[in-house]
Amino acid sequence: MSKILSKIPRILIAAAALAMLIWVNLNFVTAGTYIGSALFGAIFLAALLWNPLCGLIKRVWSKIIGKIFLIVIGGFAAVCAVMCIIFSVNMAVHIEKPLDDPKAVIVLGCQVRGETPSSMLAYRLIAAEEVMNAHPNTVCVVSGGQGSGEDISEAEAMHRFLVDRGIDESRIIKEDKSVSTRENFRFSVALLAERGITDGVVVVTNDFHQFRADIYARENGLKTVGHHSSRTPARNILNYWVREWAAIMALPFGI
């Protein structure tokens, strides 16, 4: 009986890791899929093969080079874990940051299917519409170029979406050259600067994306930045959240 009870924690860990492995692979493939699959797959296998794994670790630890190897691997894993926790706290803090009297909205682009905004982009546009309706004097930069599988630029698709929902097109500024979040901000900030706007900007994107968006906004000289986040479907949030860890880690390399 005691042997069975001793296996329960490992069974629960394996089941949880398997559930997370399935969750991270729902619907689509991103960098988050690969990172999450590696992480939860490793946890799942470790729980299943706990005794052989412990035996292997003991054999490796018995050698000096093995001790060095395990210390380096363990240290690297610990640093990565701490960084991901720090990133997650910052991502959560930046999800929503209202401004009392915004001057402009920047909507970050996302996939367009043919000429139709994807569901993720539609959520962003609905969130932007909320800000614009609440603040009738704001202008809106819709930012995104034309990517693979897109018949028109993301900016054009966003422009059409907002106009169809009753937003005056004189309030919409199209930025249709960017192909990355960094370029979204570089080109959008330049367009706003031409109109004398360098502060009081609300960034609209998904919740998980706002922390990195804030970094880019400040890199490009925006003095005050607010955030209004669109919803992310629960089935997708883990994948995007893990992918965002990788994107934030890549920031120092200019990626």
Image (cartoon, grey):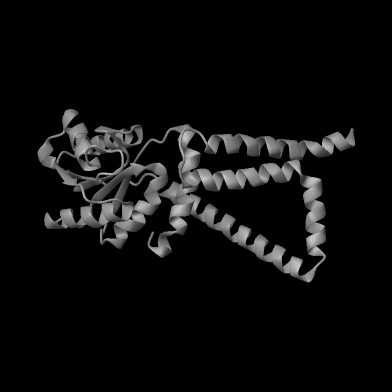
Q: Residue at x 62, y 58 (%)?
A: 77
In this rendering, position of residue 250 left or right of residue 53: left
Q: In the displayed image of the protein, which residue is found farthest to the right?
A: 1
Q: Locate the N terminus and report the quarter of the image it occupies.
A: top right
* Closer-to-camera residue (26/245): 26
* Closer-to-camera residue (104/242): 242
Q: Residue at x 36, y 57 (%)?
A: 215
Where does the image place residue 21, in percent across and percent down from the top left? Answer: 59, 38
Q: Residue at x 40, y 42 (%)?
A: 207
Q: Residue at x 64, y 36 (%)?
A: 18
Q: Is residue 226 visible from the viewing direction of this image?
A: yes
Q: Is residue 102 visible from the viewing direction of this image?
A: no
In the rendered view, would you say 155 is above or below 190?
above
Where does the image place residue 194, in percent across and percent down from the top left? Answer: 12, 57
Q: For the image shown, how many numbered marks are present on the structure?
A: 0
Residue 199 in which image quadrant = bottom left
